[in-house]
Image (cartoon, grey):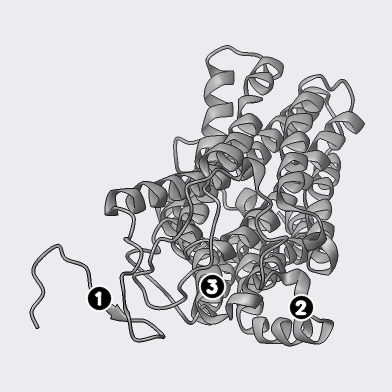
């Protein structure tokens, strides 16, 4: 029997009677929820990394104004990376026991505290405490928000990644622009206190409360409810939360994740080996750019590449991230050879390579977490996201152990 346009399908119930399914919410409502969550996760990614980028730039600025000895930069690097590393190592063991809202509040408070401490700093120790607070905020935020994506359609991973990529560009540009416009570093930092407030508003007021997802195909149904998260603890009472996993299940999931974790560790190891150990040594005298200007261009092009590739998931998906790890290692070998032999004739070739380096790093990040979301079971996804978070920080930490001594060694040779 035919069915005219706009009529409902009628089904047989368990007793044989005809039943009418609940009408679906209008498509416009689905689209509205989709965009609220998309913008929410983009802003969470931006704010989570923005505070870290701005604060770290300011900490270096204050240390230089205090004429601190050169080895203070090593102390800044340790204060920057070690708290995040500790948080990400411990997160899969017990962080899931703490509900999401307190975690987000703590992350926002630490970000605001880092701005205030560095703004009013009159000593190296106080500045380093600000760096530590920013590192805690960034590490805790990344673990929290990536775990939270397990309760939303997988598309939010792309939006989160794009926001984190945008933070590198906008964070550095905002601090540079405001200080160049005449604001003191102190007033510039205090003006940034709106960023932690925006992070909290994005979580509590913009995101909608998630419901169980349909894990099927590329086009996922939008099933999020319309209530804000302000009165809802998302995974604590939901079946399938990582709190219900046994130690044996956690170990099994972790072993399966090594296929994704190891390539991302390698990508970030090579990437930050270049950034920490080689950028300052890639100096061209046959150009109008000063050494400091060349370094700033390297950083800007790198951040531009990261932002572009972290925003590219809709048009380019890569399943085998091992290929990205191999290409990044080739980048490292090529640039290390140029530092040693100085065979590249133009700085513009270095510009292209560094842009390419950023593209590889951003692509590895977004595709790794997207692949994990696609290929893990629903009940394992929250735990898997928290575990995989360690990859980039571990790669950066390992690169710091080797890149800084190598940098000093090469400096003594030149």
Relative to the observer, which residue lies in front, 258 or 266? 258
Secondary structure under tag 3 reads helix
Q: In which quarter of the view is residue 311 placed?
A: bottom left
Q: Residues within 10 Å of mark 3 (few under 14, many from 20)?
A: many
Q: Which label's residue is closer to the chain start, 2 or 3?
A: 2
| Residue drawn at 51 percent across, 36 percent down | 170
Q: Nearer the viewer, mark 2 or mark 3?
A: 2
Q: Are marks 3 and 1 in contact (CB under 8 Å)?
A: no
Mark 2 to mark 3: distance in Å? 17 Å
Q: Which mark is residue 373?
A: 3
Rendered position, 143 above or below 256: above
Provide residue 382's location: percent of width, then percent of height.
Answer: 65, 68
Q: Is residue 104 above or below residue 129?
A: below
**Residue 230: image location, x then y, percent:** 63, 40
- In percent of width and height, residue 105 lies at 74, 40
Inter-mark Cα distance, 3 to 1: 35 Å
- Classify mark 1: residues with Cα within 10 Å, few (<14), some (14-19) or many (20+): few
Q: Secondary structure at mark 1?
A: loop
The numbered dot on residue 10 is 1
Q: Is residue 36 above or below residue 235?
A: above
Helix or strand or loop: what does disc 2 sit on?
A: loop
**Residue marked by disc 2:** 245
How far apart, in angstroms, are the residues tagged by discs 1 and 2?
Answer: 40 Å
């Amino acid at each position: 029997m035919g069915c005219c346009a706009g009529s409902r399908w009628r089904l047989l119930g368990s007793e044989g009677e005809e039943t009418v399914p609940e009408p679906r919410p209008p498509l416009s409502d689905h689209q509205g929820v989709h965009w609220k969550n998309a913008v929410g996760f983009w802003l969470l990614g931006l704010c989570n990394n923005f505070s870290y980028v701005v604060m770290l730039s300011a900490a270096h600025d204050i240390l230089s104004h205090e004429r601190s000895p050169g080895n203070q930069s090593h102390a800044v690097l340790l204060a920057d990376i070690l708290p995040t590393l500790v948080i990400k190592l411990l997160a899969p063991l017990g962080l899931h026991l703490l509900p999401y809202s307190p975690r987000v509040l703590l992350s926002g408070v630490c970000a605001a505290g880092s701005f205030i401490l560095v703004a009013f700093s009159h000593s190296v120790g106080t500045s380093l405490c600000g760096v530590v607070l920013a590192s805690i905020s960034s590490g805790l935020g990344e673990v929290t928000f990536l775990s939270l994506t397990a309760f939303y359609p997988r598309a939010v991973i792309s939006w989160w990644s794009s926001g984190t990529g945008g933070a590198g560009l906008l964070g550095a540009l905002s601090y540079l622009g405001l200080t160049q416009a005449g604001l003191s570093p102190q007033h510039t930092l205090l003006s940034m206190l709106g960023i932690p407030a925006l992070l909290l508003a994005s979580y509590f007021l913009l995101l909608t409360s998630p419901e169980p997802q349909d894990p099927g195909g590329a086009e996922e149904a939008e099933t999020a409810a319309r209530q804000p998260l302000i009165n809802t603890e998302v995974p604590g009472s939901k079946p399938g939360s990582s709190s219900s996993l046994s130690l044996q299940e956690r170990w099994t999931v972790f072993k399966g994740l090594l296929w994704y974790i190891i390539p991302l560790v390698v990508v970030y190891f090579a990437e930050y080996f270049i950034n920490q150990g080689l950028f300052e040594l890639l100096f061209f005298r046959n150009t109008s750019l000063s050494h400091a200007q060349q370094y700033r261009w390297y950083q800007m092009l790198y951040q531009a590449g990261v932002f572009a590739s972290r925003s590219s998931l809709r048009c380019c998906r890569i399943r085998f991230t091992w290929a990205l790890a191999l290409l990044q290692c080739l980048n490292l070998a090529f640039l290390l050879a140029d530092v040693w032999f100085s065979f590249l004739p133009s700085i513009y070739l270095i510009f292209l390579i560094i842009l390419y380096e950023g593209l590889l790093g951003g692509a590895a990040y977004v595709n790794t977490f997207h692949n994990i979301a696609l290929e893990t079971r629903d009940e394992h996804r929250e735990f898997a996201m928290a575990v995989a978070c360690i990859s980039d920080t571990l790669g950066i930490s390992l690169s710091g152990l080797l890149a800084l001594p190598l940098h000093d060694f090469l400096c003594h040779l030149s």
